[in-house]
Image: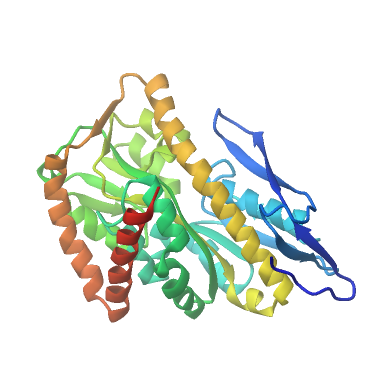
Amino acid sequence: MAFLLDAPGDRVFLLGQIDAVKTQKKGPMRKTTKIKLNQLIGTGILTLATVVSSHAAEWKYAMGEGLEDPQGIYATAFKDFIEENSRHTIKIYPVGSLGEETDMMEQAQAGILQFLGQSTGYMGGTIPEMDLFTLPYVMPTDTAQLDYFFKNSKVVNELLPPIFREHGLELLSVFPEGEMAITTFEPFRSPEDLEGKKMRVMPGSPVLVETYKAFGASPVPMSWGDLIGALKTNMIDGQENPTVWIEAYGLDDLTNVLTYIGHGHFNASVSANKAFFDDLGRRDKRLIRLAAEHAHGVVLEEAQKLDAYGLGRIVRTNPDYQIVTLTEAERAPFKEAAETVQASFAEKSDTNKKLLEQMLADLEEAEANAE
């Protein structure tokens, strides 16, 4: 049982059982979670202490997705925890509210924003080490292994936080959003089939460019805001995203085939401005860590549901849409091509090499221990 000492003007709460009260939003699985904290002593379920400070503040939280997407689910759970357990409030700025992803990163580093939720793929341009999570055929597709990895990984919990601090950020969470799928106008089953195809990739990530070159395609870095128009006008031949995004934003209506090649997951991170975080008292720091831990658990559960139900809705609402899963034999040449991308990442710096080696060790542990 953890306790924080009382102080003048503060009230100490012993947090007992957390009852998750889920509120339905748009769509059958678009849910967010609001917590009710019962002041129960001795329950043994969750006995963590936090403090409601007498000094209230409004904190700004921007993210690269909508409120009903995985990053939005995390942000809402984080906000609810903070506001249930302090006098602080959080204002959430969904995707597009404050510009592009690079704009939000700059604002977070400058301290204009206190919190930032962003895809790891976008972060590679600012924090090159984050391209680790974009490497093809490194992350598993098994959700139990992913959950174990993101909760227990030494890469996430020990090696990355100091790197984030060098960039003016305090890392709070890294979590998976769903398996990456590739949507195209024509089916493909080999790198030769992708030769010359213009594939949109997230801007800012050298690894994504290298990956699609290795896969035989012609990668086109492009912002999310330009993607829909590019598909409508055939400026590109395809793109990749997790299924939840493909369904939610109608990308299946703009292409003809969705293909799973098993090459990776879409991951996101949440961080705080370092100067802001460092200036907080230990009670507020503890509060933020607890909120991040709570939100992490919520999004791991809900993101899996969103991904599965997204695919189900595509099957029901777009029955003529082709959904292809490559066999292990068909994936083999893609995996072989991916080895050059992995090697290139490791060769760029000793830090990259250390991160990749530790990630592989962490993933081996996750495979052995995941339930």
Q: Is residue 342 toward the left or the right of residue 107 in the image?
A: left
- The image shows residue 252 at horizontal and vertical percentages of 37, 31
Give the quarter of the image for residue 354: bottom left
* Residue 171 or residue 68, whichever sits in front: 171
**Image x and y of residue 111, in percent:** 62, 72
Placement of 288 over or under 259, stated as above or below: below
State left or right for residue 108 relative to residue 337. right
Residue depicted at x 86% and y 69%:
10
Q: Is residue 351 above or below residue 155?
A: below
Question: Which image quadrant: the N terminus?
Answer: bottom right
Q: Residue 253 sits in which quadrant?
A: top left
Q: Quadrant of residue 170?
A: bottom right
Question: Does residue 303 appear left or right of residue 25 in this picture?
Answer: left
The residue at 70%/76% (across/down) is: 282
Q: Residue at x 31, y 48 (%)?
A: 200
**Residue 177 x %, y %:** 44, 47
In the depicted structure, whether residue 93 falls above or below residue 315: below
**Residue at x 16% of width, y 44% of height:** 331
Residue 40 appears anywhere in the view: yes
Q: Is residue 96 visible?
A: no
Q: Furthest residue to the right?
A: 8
